[in-house]
Image (tube, helix red, strand yellow):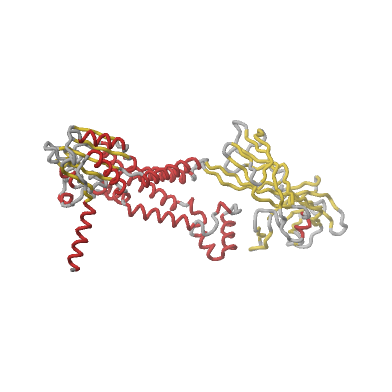
Amino acid sequence: MEKEKIRCECGHENPIGTKLCAVCGRALTEEEQQKKLADMRYDGIAIRSKTYNKSIIDKIWNFFSSVKVGIALIITNLIAASIGTILPQEFYINAATEEAKKIYYTDLYGTFGTIYYNLGLSDVYSSWWFQILVAMLGVSIIIASIDRGVPLHKSLKNQRVKRHANFMKRQRVIAEGKPTVAQANTLELAEQKLKGLRYNVRREGNALMAEKNRLSRYGPYINHLGLIIFLVGVMLRLVPGFHVDESIWVAEGELRAVPGMDGYFIYNEDFILETHEGQAQGEQLKQGVNVVAKNFQTDAILYKQAEGSLPGQIDNLEEVKSYEIRVNHPLKHEGYAFYQMDYSLNELHKMRFALTNKATEESLGDIVIDLTNPDTVYEIDANTKVEILSYVPDFDGFKDGEPQTASPSPNNPAFIFRMYTPETPEGETSFVAIKNTLEPLGENAYKMSFQNIETRDKTGLTIRKDSTIPILFVGGFIFMLGVVIGSYWAHRRVWIEELEDGTIRLAAHTNKNWFGIKKELDALTEFAHLPAYADQVDLEKEKEKEKEGDNTL
């Protein structure tokens, strides 16, 4: 179905909703005809959101194209983002499980922290509702830009030189009359001066149009483009591979898969802590005084799986880089950076126990338990073995008869052993923790005697990659460019027509800084001997002042 058209007296057919004819500039609607000054905001061209409001698509389009809705969405996004700054977000805390995260917020911030976590505010920027708000803002910017920017571009691109008298007289700055000096080359002089003022001049018979700084009208839409690119960069941070911000703890001698880097492994060859002179590291720790580190670093080796390897396969790793990671000196590879962020000294690593006869104190043999990866069964000989029925790394008491752990770290290890010996082939059960041994099934003949413990240092590394930084930078740069263009440039146009009787008709318009265009018109009027111009807005103000004066008298 062909869209409705409005036919102007000049014969041109304009789309429904057009206020000023695209060819001659004549007012097309009764409302526009009653205005003393022409509506030049979009050069009177039809705007979709101000024309159609019937279908559901029209209503959705009009909703998102509304300036008020756009401002409301910006404010809503700012409020939502500010909520995420009240308490630290989840990716800034050391908590691997959801339960650990909840405990963190509850312990540090009490009831408020619990509510904050339960509402999902601890991970605001990754939440679905925040991403919806960002997406809605992006849709609003795109629709508003299309709704106003495309018609404006068409209008400016197809400007005509010669305009109707009605258009000329309804501009803010106008002039009409004979040249102040008798001459036959008024338009040539005007053209010469306008070109000297850096206007682009077009001639059409006895009329000319001069224009400069048209790009200023596109300033807001350049802003919109920058914002859209910036928002795309923000949303891409949720796409795997674009943004990585992970933490990992690696003990000395340990090989760990790197989170966020599929196929890569990091090996902690050695951790080094250097303190300032006069501080004894061991003594300071015993006294409970914080060590002031002069330097702490991780001698690390980055490995990569060979091509064709299965996930987690570590028997064919290829060394990528060896590096001493220090504070502000990260290991970098393919856009990823490993930062030295934290450390933990003297963490429990291995515990040695002896299977001992309680009556004779005779040992049947020792077992060594790796606290990070304990075996299920430890065989001493053909008839003697120890089975671990249960292991809790950080013993925190019993619940319903079961031992509980406070964390996955071996801070306070506890075991339930089942001991098999030639004298007790059916086995004996014993619960063993540091400074605590229980025999829940009755008196045992054997016990697990603690012998010694091995400790090691752990390093805390943060792995970061942000491929969205260039996108955010480009978006921010384009946005600021739009701000400069829209704020400091002014779109100026001058129309001049010479009538058959030698009368000169002039009109001028600018989207801002009327003082600046008037200075240029002063120079043009003097050089080309044009009739004096008048500012209709100023004239109206003077009339109002005169009326107020008369009423006062």
Where is residue 182, by image quadrant? top left
The spot of residue 191 in percent (x, y) is 25, 35
**Numbered circles on residues, count:** 0
The spot of residue 299 in percent (x, y) is 70, 42
Question: In this image, 264 relative to 163: left or right?
Answer: right
Front residue of this view, candidates 43 and 114? 43
Q: Residue furthest front?
A: 181
Front residue of this view, candidates 112 and 289? 289
- Residue 224 seen in this snapshot: yes
Front residue of this view, candidates 326 and 62? 326
Q: Residue at x 17, y 33 (%)?
A: 184
Where is residue 168, by image quadrant? top left
Q: Residue at x 65, y 38 (%)?
A: 302
Where is residue 284, by image quadrant? bottom right
- Residue 17 seen in this snapshot: no
The spot of residue 414 in percent (x, y) is 72, 57
Q: Where the N terminus falls, by quadrant?
A: top left
Q: Residue furthest top?
A: 307
Q: Where the C terminus falls, by quadrant?
A: bottom left
Q: Residue at x 70, y 43 (%)?
A: 268
The spot of residue 459 in percent (x, y) is 68, 48
